[in-house]
């Protein structure tokens, strides 16, 4: 295994074995108002949405997590089985490893064998700075072909890069690369954070580019600082072990980030609400705050490493809970969720 492969393997193992969640889950600070007279039929609630011109049967995306080492193929396959069954979106983790070592393509490409309505390619923002415009465009096409992607995600991961011992923390020129890239690439581009959230100011800047959506990837769920804390510990690197712990809870809470991004973009760009979503009620809260779709990573990871039945059960439960929450607030369409709003106590 080279360095990129073993890093991806360690991320998954640490997420399963250790507690890598933020100290506080901000979805607990959001409440929906009960409607004692909903006047709708629970079984007629329409959960389907249109996102990036594709129809999803529920407003759920399996957020990009893995690929790039041999065991990841099975995890991605299990996730793909569930994405196909429930007709929801699915992303893969950073595809850099397969560009460096083409025999790893299959660990991502396996998802092409499943009828998934919306597939997201993925690369870290620090990587496109290193590559520069021309090489990024060349590599992007390879990543799109690798999974037949409908959407391209650029992942802002500077918290992780800053605390990780082998991090690449040069963000100079990153915005300009995103701007140029979003103008050239043929499929929609989504900019995504990976656990530290996107502010009003950053969203305002991104809105001036040609991107098609924002995944807020806010704080309160998986903490990449926590993951890097444990990775440094494994390597007896006490300097980074301590630094990563300090930034464990760094970031903008996901519910706040949804509101900031919505305000900055006049609610004109689709918003994906990844960050700390544990169940269908959290997903419903995010829709009420104005997200178009909920993104879920960690909640789906453990079941996906176990079996296809485990991940199918997890997704089915989440979708059922979302339907129950919508029934209890008296809303029969996803697009109407933002009209009821939610109370925020953060
Ligand atoms: C094991 C693991 C690996 C991840 N790798 C990536 C990645 O390669 N690219 C990316 O954009 N996000 C990555 N993420 C971040 C997730 O997509 C998501 O933004 C984050 O975990 C917050 O969601 P959660 O609280 O539901 O876990 C990863 C998350 C986990 C748990």
Image: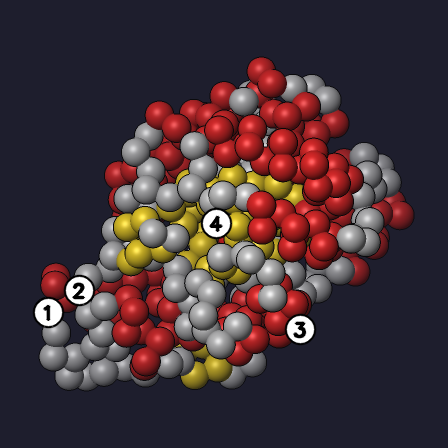
| Above/below status of 136 relative to 54 | above
Mark nearest the camera among 4 and 2 is 4
Q: Is mark 4 within 8 Å of ligand 1?
A: no
Q: Residue furthest top?
A: 103
Mark nearest the camera among 4 and 1 is 4
Q: In the drawing, does residue 34 fall left or right of residue 249?
A: left
Q: Which residue is mark 1?
A: 41
Dot 4 or dot 1: first in sequence order is 1
- On the image, the x and y values in percent for residue 302 come to 47, 40
Q: Residue shown at 70%/36% (left/top)?
A: 134
Mark nearest the camera among 3 and 4 is 4
Q: Indicate which disc residue 201 carries.
A: 3
Q: Residue furthest front?
A: 184
Dot 3 or dot 2: first in sequence order is 2
Q: Indicate which disc residue 45 carries.
A: 2
Q: Residues within 10 Å of mark 4 (few under 14, many from 20)?
A: some
Secondary structure under the numbered disc 4 in the rendered image: loop
Does any portion of residue 329 appear in the rendered image? Answer: yes
Mark nearest the camera among 3 and 2 is 3
Q: CA distance from mark 3 to mark 2?
A: 36 Å
């Amino acid at each position: 295994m080279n360095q990129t492969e073993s890093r991806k393997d360690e991320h998954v193992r640490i997420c399963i074995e250790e507690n890598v969640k933020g100290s506080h889950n901000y979805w607990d600070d959001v409440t929906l108002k009960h409607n004692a007279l909903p006047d709708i039929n629970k079984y007629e609630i329409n959960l389907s949405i249109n996102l990036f011109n594709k129809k999803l049967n529920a407003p759920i995306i399996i957020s990009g997590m893995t690929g790039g080492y041999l065991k990841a193929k099975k995890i991605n396959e299990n996730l793909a089985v569930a994405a196909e069954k429930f007709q929801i979106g699915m992303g893969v983790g950073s595809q850099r490893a397969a560009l460096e070592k083409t025999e790893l393509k299959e660990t991502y490409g396996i998802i092409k064998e499943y009828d998934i309505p919306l597939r997201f390619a993925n690369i870290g923002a620090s990587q496109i700075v290193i590559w520069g415009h021309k090489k990024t465009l060349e590599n992007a096409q390879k990543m799109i072909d690798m999974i037949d992607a409908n959407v391209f995600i650029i992942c802002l991961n500077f918290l992780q890069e800053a605390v990780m011992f082998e991090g690449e923390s040069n963000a100079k020129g990153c915005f300009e690369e995103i701007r140029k890239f979003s103008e050239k690439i043929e499929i929609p581009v989504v900019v995504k954070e990976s656990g530290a959230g996107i502010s009003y100011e950053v969203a305002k800047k991104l809105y001036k580019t040609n991107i098609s959506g924002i995944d807020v990837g806010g704080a309160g769920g998986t903490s990449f600082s926590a993951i890097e804390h444990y990775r440094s510990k494994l390597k007896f690197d006490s300097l980074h072990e301590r630094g990563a712990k300090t930034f464990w809870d760094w970031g903008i809470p996901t519910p706040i980030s949804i509101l900031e991004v919505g305000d900055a973009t006049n609610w004109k760009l689709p918003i994906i609400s990844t960050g700390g979503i544990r169940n269908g009620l959290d997903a419903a809260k995010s829709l009420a705050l104005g997200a178009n779709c909920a993104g879920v990573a960690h909640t789906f990871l453990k079941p996906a490493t176990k079996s296809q039945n485990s991940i199918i059960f997890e997704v089915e439960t989440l979708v059922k809970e979302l339907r129950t929450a919508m029934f209890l607030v008296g809303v029969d369409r996803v697009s109407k969720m933002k009209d009821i709003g939610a109370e925020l106590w953060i």
